[in-house]
Image (tube, rainbow, N blue to C red):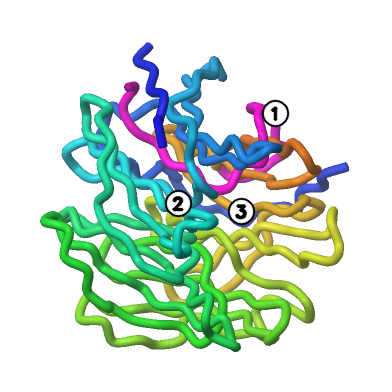
């Protein structure tokens, strides 16, 4: 792999008042949006967008790039799902603040999806066991020195991860084949509980992407997989009370808030190119922030590179 780095029909439902909604970002000056994208032909990449939408290519030559997250000192982490033909090794890559890439961790026979970093610099990765008949998923914790620890697990296919302000880790589980649709909450010690179960999503709908606003509401992208255009975004209060934020989306995946409280959503379809939607604080009609660069997966905000 030779990454290239560069420095430089929707209908919206009314949204109940959330109060002042500001993003949880890595630093007070984090501005640029980073997007993992799987382009036709296997040329997978990370793109960087300025607040006005100017696009540049941050890294190319990746294998199924998925989860993205910054740590507190400016390292950018990304999961690559697996390297086809190379013993199916899922990898966590780390780009340091000078844009030098290294392999931070790996897992054989695991397809890596969501990623989140805690305040101590530990990277948590959702890893789907490709040898499991139920698509059981393990959450690996990679310490700053690269040690891999099993933090927790979910019974079926896992997707996004997100931390709340108290250090609890939330994990989305959604499987078409096994009818799983649950968001789990993991305490800092790894104890697992159900935050919301299948009844929160309806038949054939599954949680994928997760992001918290500064009021502690958990925003969730919902996919139906079989019915493009019928997907949605919902949010849950800390007590688990659900409200609908937007409907009429097509394969929404990664979610991220900017420092002004705008919600950015990666729509993985229509194939071959999806788009990134930008919703204003408090809800309302979105604008298309970017399109035509490939199939976006996950999003995060960080300092310009």
> What is the C-alpha distance between the residues marked 1 and 3?
15 Å
Foreground residue, 1 or 256? 1
Can you say whether 101 is above or below 114 in the image? Answer: above
How many neighbours does mark 2 have within 10 angstroms: few (below 14), some (14-19), or many (20 or more)?
many
Q: Is residue 164 visible?
A: no
Determine the residue located farthest toward the top in the rendered image: 8
Secondary structure beneath dot 2 equals: strand
Residue ID for mark 1 = 291
The residue drawn where x is 76% and y is 46% is: 269
Q: Which sits earlier in the primary sequence, circle 1 or circle 3?
A: 3
The residue drawn where x is 59% and y is 88% is: 133
> What is the C-alpha distance between the residues marked 2 and 1?
22 Å
118 relative to 239 in the view: left or right: left
Foreground residue, 247 or 39? 39
Q: Quadrant where the C terminus lies?
A: top left
Membership of 40 in magenta stretch: no
Q: Position of residue 157 (x, y in %)?
A: 56, 76
> What is the C-alpha distance between the residues marked 3 and 2?
16 Å
77 relative to 22 in the view: left or right: left
How many neighbours does mark 3 have within 10 angstroms: few (below 14), some (14-19), or many (20 or more)?
many
How many neighbours does mark 1 have within 10 angstroms: few (below 14), some (14-19), or many (20 or more)?
some
Foreground residue, 67 or 302? 67
Q: Is residue 124 visible?
A: yes
Q: Are marks 3 and 2 in contact (CB under 8 Å)?
A: no
For residue 253, which numbered disc appears in the image?
3
Report the magenta residues as a range: 281-305
Q: Which sits earlier in the primary sequence, circle 3 or circle 2?
A: 2
- In which quarter of the view is residue 162 placed? bottom left
Residue ID for mark 2 = 80
The residue drawn where x is 69% and y is 76% is: 201
């Amino acid at each position: 792999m030779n990454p290239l780095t560069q420095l430089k029909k929707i209908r919206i439902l009314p949204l109940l008042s959330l109060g002042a909604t500001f993003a949880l970002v890595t630093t007070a000056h984090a501005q640029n949006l980073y997007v993992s994208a799987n382009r036709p032909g296997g040329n997978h990449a990370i793109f960087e967008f300025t607040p006005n939408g100017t696009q540049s290519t941050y890294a190319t030559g990746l294998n199924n790039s998925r989860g993205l997250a910054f740590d507190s000192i400016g390292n950018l982490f990304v999961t690559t799902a697996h390297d086809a033909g190379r013993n199916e090794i899922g990898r966590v890559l780390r780009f340091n603040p000078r844009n030098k890439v290294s392999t931070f961790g790996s897992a054989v026979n695991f397809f890596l999806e969501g990623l989140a970093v805690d305040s101590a610099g530990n990277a948590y990765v959702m890893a789907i066991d490709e040898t499991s008949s139920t698509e059981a998923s393990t959450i690996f914790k990679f310490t700053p020195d690269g040690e891999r620890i099993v933090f927790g697990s979910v019974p079926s296919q896992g997707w996004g991860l997100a931390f709340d302000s108290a250090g609890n880790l939330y994990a989305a589980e959604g499987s078409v084949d096994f009818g799983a649709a649950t968001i789990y909450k993991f305490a800092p010690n790894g104890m697992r509980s159900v935050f919301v179960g299948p009844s929160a999503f309806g038949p054939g709908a599954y949680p994928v992407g997760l992001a918290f606003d500064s009021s502690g509401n958990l925003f969730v992208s919902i996919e139906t997989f079989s019915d493009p255009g019928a997907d949605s975004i919902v949010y849950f209060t800390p007590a688990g009370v659900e409200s609908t934020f937007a409907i009429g989306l097509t394969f929404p995946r990664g979610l991220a808030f900017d420092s002004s409280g705008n919600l950015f959503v990666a729509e993985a379809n229509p194939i071959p190119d999806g788009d990134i939607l930008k919703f204003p604080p408090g809800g309302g009609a979105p604008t298309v922030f970017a399109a035509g660069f490939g199939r976006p997966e996950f999003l995060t905000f960080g300092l310009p590179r």
